[in-house]
Image: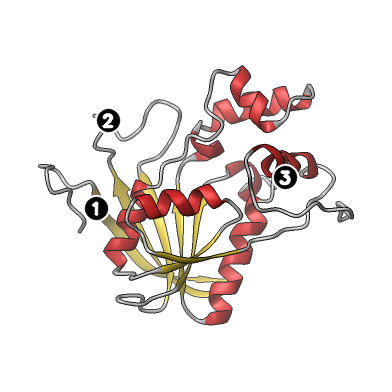
Amino acid sequence: MYVAASAIRPLLQVRAEATVPTRFGEFNMVVFNWVSPEKDQPSDGMGLSPDHVALVKGNLKGKQRVLCRVHSECLTSEVFGSLKCDCKEQLEAAQAEIARVGEGVIIYLRQEGRGIGLANKIRAYQLQAAGHDTVDANRLLDLPDDAREYDAAAAMLGHLGVASIRLMTNNPLKVDAMRQLGVVVDSRARSLIRPNVFSKNYLDAKRQRMNHALPEYDLLEEVC
């Protein structure tokens, strides 16, 4: 259990753990409860959950260069099949790659819509339908470009005893954020998904305005 040195109550608690069979093989699922030290309540009213998940393959204690995806929840794509982003495909690609190499971890953070919550995310979608990109849509709602926090992810990796990681992300700022929290990030592994006709503008905005390391895709996949 991770406990802040100056805190009376633990910030991170293990709530449940079990082996879960998936179509990518068996993973150990660990459910954590995270309470931000800056908030009295675990949620800030935007529908963000205090429960986060580590999907673990192998015994990672003391291991270096562990393949790791720090992934934020995307209900719209992962549950309802929205084609506006590549989140579901990135999550599944991470599971498949971890299964292939035989060990690794997905840290699944319950912070929908880059941390703005589901309702605000759908409001931003409406603005995007009117022609605004993902950055300007958030700003028109007086919301930050990216409100995600990674303290829980760092604490979860600490609980698992991971010595260092290879972080699967296209976002260099996520690498910086994890390092600032004390996580040893040995390297960044790309997570490239070819866009469809609905997600291309979104990914272009992430590359052009949020400095994500994404290529300029010329060909689009057909959407079934």
Q: From what the image shows, is residue 170 above or below residue 66?
A: above
Judging depth in this view, the residue of 11 and 168 nearest the camera is 168
| Residue 23 visible in the snapshot | no
Residue 203 badge: 3
Q: From what the image shows, is residue 208 above or below residue 168?
A: above
Q: Quadrant of residue 46?
A: top left
Residue occupied by mark 1: 13
Position in image of residue 212 (x %, y %):
64, 48
Q: Earlier in the sequence, mark 2 or mark 3?
A: 2
Marks 1, 2: nearer the viewer: 2
Residue occupied by mark 2: 39
Marks 3, 1: nearer the viewer: 3
Position in image of residue 34 (x %, y %):
30, 45
- The answer to whether mark 2 and mark 3 are in CB contact below 8 A is no
Provide the secondary structure element on which disc 2 rests. Answer: loop
The amino acid type found where label 2 is placed reads Lys
At horizontal 46% and vertical 78% (from top left) the residue drawn is 103
The amino acid type found where label 3 is placed reads Leu
The amino acid type found where label 1 is placed reads Gln
